[in-house]
Amino acid sequence: MPRTALCTALALALAATFPALAATAPEAARRLAQDAVIVDTHIDAPGLLEGAWTDLGEPAPDREFDYPRAREGGLDVAFMSIYTSARRDEDGSARQSAHAQIDSVEALAARHPDRFALLTSPGDVERLRAGGRVLLALGMENGAPLGDDLAQVQRFHDRGVRYITLAHSANNRIADSSYTQDKRWNGLSPFGREVIAEMNRLGIMVDVSHISDAATEQAVAASRVPVIASHSALRHFTPGFERNLSDALARAIAERGGVIQIPFGTAFVNPQAAADTQAYFRAIDAFDRRNAEHAAAGRPAEDRAAFVERWDREHPSPATAIDAVLDQIDHAVKLVGIDHVGIGSDFDGVDGNLPDGLRSVADYPNLVAGLQARGYAEADIRKLLGGNLLRVWAEVEAGAAR
Ligand SMILES: [Zn+2]
């Protein structure tokens, strides 16, 4: 769809403020980005909205996702990440947080019915995106809000959740995390297997991003339908970083029909940043355990915020080129085939630590230009941008009906 004059004016205003957002991609790339259905499976806007409401239907220059830039970049389906941390799992606030974040996504659509619509089925994409709407789908990052209650899977399906990332930075009731040193279940828990069966029954995609190798292998085997990795890069480039998929696991996902959504965040695609990220989660894990011991012994807690601040200061995110993301896509396509790769940026979830040229939802044309420069055919670029994810989603939906 051609950009409207209004969007162009907004884009120019934004480009003046943020030169990195200027329309640098060639016209052919911009045209394809507008025409293709772009599905980004991981945008962390709702967690920020929960902390401080921002109307993302209007320009929100301190965020990486807003309506004007989504249109500028050609984004059609934005999976809003309903993210809850391991700490919220522990203190019992994860379920309320998830509902509050879903409320905020609903509010965006309700305030701007001409700009946003909620999306719960891949079959509705063409109809709902007419008129330039950006479609908001829901992915739950961390199964913590389910607690130990299987009925919550249905509850969150009713609210629109269409994928669940089984765990996040810590082992939870469902699965082990890639970030922990001491695994709790050696993969999935018995409850985790029930959750997967229930997700299959309802048509919620199983997301293996963030979980341990053993949990990923078991989830792929346990699911009756293809699984996704909503935002996982390949470990090939980041040796020892369990958060990224090994070649063997990527192949296992693809062999069962699933799709690997490549993230943009520097922490996933830059080897140094990945090593730092792995080390951070180990360090914060140890820090939290130390504080738990302090609490048990009646000693005062160490300052967590100060620890995190010092860590960030000592581990600055390295400058990264867009080629790091293109290299990931190339490797994934060679490894598992063009039908099993997509994109899950992690915008608004990585503190702005992103490659040059991929800094917000305005920048998908730069990715398209990079793929064109590497010789990808138009039909293949369309698969990578969203076609593959929509196919898997439709399969998961069809599986639920059976
Ligand atoms: Zn994540």
Image (cartoon, rainbow, N blue to C red):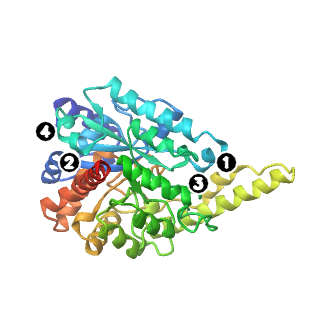
Q: What residue type is labelled 4?
A: Pro
Q: Quick one: SS at disc 3?
A: loop
Asked whether the residues under the numbered discs 3 and 4 touch, taking CB atoms below 8 Å apart as contact, a structural biologist would say no
The residue indicated by pointer 1 is 305
Q: How far apart are marks 4 and 2 (CA)?
A: 14 Å
Which residue is disc 4 drawn over? 2
Q: With 335 as the anchor, is 218 left or right in this view?
A: right
Labelled pair 4, 2 in contact (Cβ < 8 Å): no
* Badge 1 element: helix
Residue picked out by circle 3: 173
User: What amino acid type is highlighted by mark number 1?
Assistant: Ala
Q: Tell me which label, 3 or 1, sits earlier in the chain.
A: 3
In the displayed structure, does residue 190 sit left or right of residue 138? Answer: right
- CB-based contact (under 8 Å), mark 3 and mark 2: no
**For the residue labelled by badge 2, is the local secondary structure a helix, a strand or a loop?**
loop
| Alpha carbon distance from label 1 to label 2 | 41 Å
Give residue 129's position: percent from left, percent from top: 20, 37
Q: Distance between the residues labelled 3 and 4?
A: 47 Å
Q: Which of marks 3 and 2 is in front?
A: 3
Give the foreground label among 1 and 2.
2
First in sequence, mark 3 or 4: give its number: 4
Residue 206: tell me if it is visible: yes
- For mark 2, what is the residue? 37
373 versus 104 height, above or below: below
Q: Are marks 3 and 1 in contact (CB under 8 Å)?
A: no
Task: State which tag comes first along the sequence, 4 or 2.
Answer: 4
Q: Which of 1 and 318 is in front in this view?
A: 1
| Image location (x, y in percent) of residue 68 | 28, 35
Q: How crowded is mark 4: few (under 14 residues within 10 Å), some or many (20 or more)?
A: few
Dot 4: element:
loop
User: Can you tell which quarter of the image residue 235 is in?
Assistant: bottom left
